Image (tube, rainbow, N blue to C red):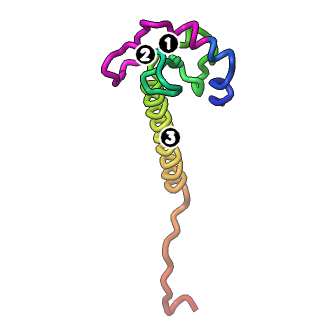
Amino acid sequence: MSAEIYNTHRWRQLVKLLVRPGALCEIEECAAPSREIIFGLRHRHPLGPSLDHIIELQYGGAPYDPHNLRPAHLGCNVRKSNRLRKEHRAGLLRLVARAGRAKAAAAPSRAKRTASALDH
């Protein structure tokens, strides 16, 4: 879904409109030496302009709503998205493991039978 949003004219126009020269990266975990977003860098430079979704798309955030977007360094935005994706996957794995344990606990136990002389 993300490639469909970010590779559009509409998205590029939003970046130009909402990320102005002098804008600061609004991601709390900004790791850049300066929070200022730098323009005129090569395409996809980590300190270049990007927009971050405040409410992530996977949680129902509006993709093009200016109220759901904030200026960010591209690198900070990518790191945040990767971290959230990793946390989401880990949460899903915990749910699957928990469901597997619950299923195993609910299954009737199979007592091992041993052969004895009385079984004949």
Is there a contact, CB below 8 Å, between mark 2 and mark 3?
Answer: no
The residue identified by callout 1 is 70
Mark 2: few, some, or many residues within 10 Å (few <14, many ≥20)? Answer: some
In x, y percent, where is residue 46?
Answer: 44, 27
Q: Give the range drawn in magenta.
A: 14-38
Residue occupying image coordinates x 52% and y 90%: 118
Query: Given this view, does label 2 or label 1 mark the residue nearer the observer?
Result: 2
Q: What residue type is labelled 3?
A: Arg
In x, y percent, where is residue 101?
Answer: 48, 52
Q: Which quadrant of the structure image shows residue 27?
A: top left
Q: What residue type is labelled 2?
A: Ile
Residue 53 in magenta?
Answer: no
Q: How far apart are the alpha carbons under marks 3 and 1?
A: 25 Å
The residue identified by callout 3 is 89
Q: In which quarter of the image is the N terminus?
A: top right
Q: How far apart are the alpha carbons under marks 2 and 1?
A: 15 Å
Q: Which amino acid does label 1 sit on?
A: Arg
Query: Given this view, does label 3 or label 1 mark the residue nearer the observer?
Result: 1
Residue occupying image coordinates x 64% and y 17%: 11
Mark positioned earlier in the residue sequence (3 or 1): 1
Classify 64 as above or below 5: above
